[in-house]
Image (spheres, rainbow, N blue to C red):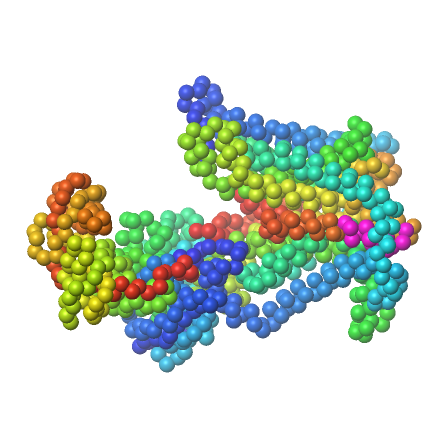
Amino acid sequence: MTAATGQPTATRPALRHRLAERGIDRALLLLVPGLIFIAVLFLYPFLYGVGLSFSPQQGGGPFANYRKFFDDPYLRNTLWTTFRLALPAALINVLASIPMAYKLRRPFRGKRTLTTLLVVPITLGTVLTAEGLLEYLAPAGWLNKTLLALHLIDQPIELVHNYWGVLFSLIITGFPFAFLLTMSYLSGIDPTLESAAATLGAGWRERFRFITLPLLAPGLAITFCLSFVLAFSVFPSAFLVGDPSGRTRVISIAAYHAALEQFDFSLGSTIAVIMTVAMLIVIAAVLAWRGTLYKGASGGKG
Amino acid sequence: MSTTVIDPVPTPVADTAAAPRSGRRLVGSPGTWLVWGLVAFFFVNLAGVVFSVLVSSLSVRWFGTWLPDGWTTHWYSDAWREFNLSSVLVVTAEVALSVVVVSVLIGLPASYVLARRTFPGKRLVMLLFLLPILIPPIAYGIPLATVLYKVHLAGSLTGVILANLVPSVPFVVLTMTPFIEQIDTKIESAARMCGASTAAVFFRVLGPLLIPGILAASILVLVRTVGMFELTFLTSGPTSETLVIVLFNNVLGAGIRAPQSVDAMAVVYTASMLVLLVVALRFINPTQLVTRLKDESTA
Amino acid sequence: MTVRARQFDELRLDGVSRSYGGHAALAGLDLTIGCGEFVALLGPSGCGKTTALNCVAGLLPLSGGSIWLDDKRIDGLPPERRDFGMVFQNYALFPHMSVRRNIAFGLRMHKVPKAERDRRVEEAISLVQLNEHAAKFPGQLSGGQQQRVAIARAVALQPPLVLMDEPLSNLDATLRLEMRTEIRRLHQTLGLTTVYVTHDQEEALSLADRLVVLRAGSVQQIGTPEEVYAHPANRYVAGFMGYRNMFELDVIESEQARVVLGGDGLKLRGVNCEAISSGRAVAAIRPEDFVVGKAIANRLEVGVEVVEYHGRDQSVQGRLRTGEAVHFRTDQRLAPGDDVTLSVPEERVLVFSPDTPPPPTEASG
């Protein structure tokens, strides 16, 4: 591959020639601004935060903050609260996306409109969604009114300022994301593979199970990871439609609270680090599972 | 023949290829009804969410009835004055546009290298550019805010712009790399064979080809920056709050102001986002709005 | 379900048509295919041949007509219940399955017991001589090997009918010749009824028992390779069958079988293929039917412009004094600038009506 990208280096000195053969030449300088940027604004603050997390403001040794987090049930539980929200939300979003994307993968009239409408909640962002949910799901909101009118319930159900409000907001913003991602993975699978399976006697169930699903699985793993990241970093909606001091006190609220309300930057950083590690563990697990799957070309343009 | 064409546009050709009898199957099977039912359910609720806000912002009073007692638009002028929306919008535009320009300037050269070269450590560089998108903004936002406080940038417009650049630059890189990859290298070679200098190759050949990609990436960054809550929330001060922060603060502090007034602001926010969205969709496919991570993660 | 090769008498396509939003990609194809026959659908891209194949396979619903397998109407059946084998242009091998599992897929779908399945998979693998590659994945195989897997997968079920969609178009020239022989050999040993789609007339002529020439969705001619080659039905088929020279002239004299055309200082006597009596007509002549030097009949004075070396002979492009290009082949050494006299026996000049059917549109293949 290096030969293909090589510059006309034949007449240059030997060292430069040897470097060029490995793909190192002046063009790589174009990367420098980007890398400096990442180093200064991302890596340095992050590592600084990691360092800060090991030097607690109240003293007590490098691990005092970590001990504090896991000893204090009020802090420790935020981790489980977050998982209890993020895992179901990511699972629901991905699992609902599969059949829908599968059914809607073929071109049909209005598909573009549909995908466009799906983008709306992504664009609106969490804050506006939360604001809308507050009114829509309120005891006197349209949803409760409709359910009451249909005699499905006897009295308004509590859907905001609790777990359900946050879960709904995670689904409303997360589902379109998972759906569009799944759709783009599906469209990367050569449709003639399914045709081939059909001529070999496979009905739609078999085609889905033996052809589409195995080829889609690596993409689904990525979709799950990204949906999970999105749900795991839940913050404004946990404040607005949740119960931020109780049942939906998620880990990002704890981190924010520690750092910018109590001004204990060290504890805040500790919580941020724990949050990152917990998330990376889940992603690593999913990616490890993905590693066992077939990941080669899935047809596409031949 | 076109049996291998995968074309997002529903042309008859793609239909031939796509075929397993979608024509017949789309009618009536329970699975189809279920799927369309779910789609409808999702959109009904979404419409409920959006229209609740819209109707409320236009209502005189609205307590526990299907529709409000009367209609008015005065909440908009109220909100405009009360929340000082004009200056908030100016701040929002300043932040968003600066982030777009800077992130394209930094991200584009990097994505050119990543698209065209193989070099030792390329995977590591890719990972570095992926991390700020993968890690929750709160998780790196708190240490970042801490550092910005230390250097006295937190609370200022510069601080907000810097913080918002962290996910935007990688986003430009991840959007533009596949875009540049799909431009045939032979075009550059051909330009060189015709005697074009490096500068001429960049500005006369590559530049025009890159414009659609740059536009798409810019609009995506714009949309994401205007909607970005966490990082702005952590780093902004009274003079550097963007629309979404003002909205959040007022939703959280509900009760102080009339809810209609907050809703009016929410509608302004929605409207500006929708305008961006409509502009965006003229240039890009909806799936792109989600992510282009796919190309990297499968590489 | 039993998967023994089911014999049948005939597959009948009855006015099969398919249109996309008002545009007819295939208009009323009537065709009867006998058991064991090798039929090629021939035409340029967009002529409707792939559409026809997909209709037979069940991958495309018809918009008109019917398909019958003996007395059974099959055009309402989904592809998985027609039990035809199909070889796709891009092979469509399942990338996540080994060669062996690819070939076994159809047998698994038909719930063939494991022992028999294994036996038949091994049979199919040795049939296409892939024994040492059986455990590999499609991505590790060359184009020719992938093609063999695709064929083995299609024939492992011993289907009554095998459909092939330009199976050789993705291969390079040498491999294509080799696989062509291979397909012919398989057809002869297995006696499989085959419908083969191609745009390559040489491929179609060498493989098929019968050709169906299509253009813009409608059939131009159906016949054996000899018939189509020697007696094309119209100017379009002639053009497709290698009649590279077409001179549009006035009819001077017309009898039942012969016709004389003239104009532009040319006078050509040829076979009256479409019973033309007056007006304009087109004389079609193959490059290899010209004789250089000997003036028998139908003389043409030509200035040589371009000479291409082809080993045993040369392909020459010349020009008439009137400016029209003439393509001919000769084993004489010619150089650009030479003036030569060409002649052509009158039975080798085919005269057609100039009215061509609508030009081919870029629609579905």
Q: Is residue C326 above or below residue B234?
A: below
Q: Residue visible at 72% across and 57% down?
A: A172
Q: Main secondary structure of the magenta part?
A: helix
Residue B151 visible in rendering:
yes
Q: How many marks?
A: 0
The answer to if B124 sits in the magenta stretch is no
Q: Is residue B256 above or below residue C124?
A: above
Check the picture and name the quadrant holding the N terminus of chain B.
bottom left
As rendered, which of A227 and B260 lies closer to the eye? B260
Left or right position of C356 against C106: left
Q: Position of residue A124 (x, y in %)?
A: 73, 51
Quarter of the rendering containing residue A107: bottom right
Residue B143 visible in rendering:
no
Left or right position of C124 against A191: left
Q: Residue visible at 44% across and 71% down?
A: C62
The answer to if B264 sits in the magenta stretch is yes
Q: Is residue C361 above or below residue B282?
A: below
Q: Position of residue C294 (x, y in %)?
A: 7, 51
As rendered, which of C181 and A184 lies closer to the eye? A184
Left or right position of C88 against B14: left
In this picture, which residue range is highlighted in magenta? B257-269
Q: Residue furthest top?
A: A13
Q: Residue visible at 85% across and 59% down?
A: B72
Q: Position of residue A9 (x, y in %)?
A: 44, 24
Q: Position of residue C56 (x, y in %)?
A: 40, 69
Q: Is residue C219 above or below residue C134?
A: below
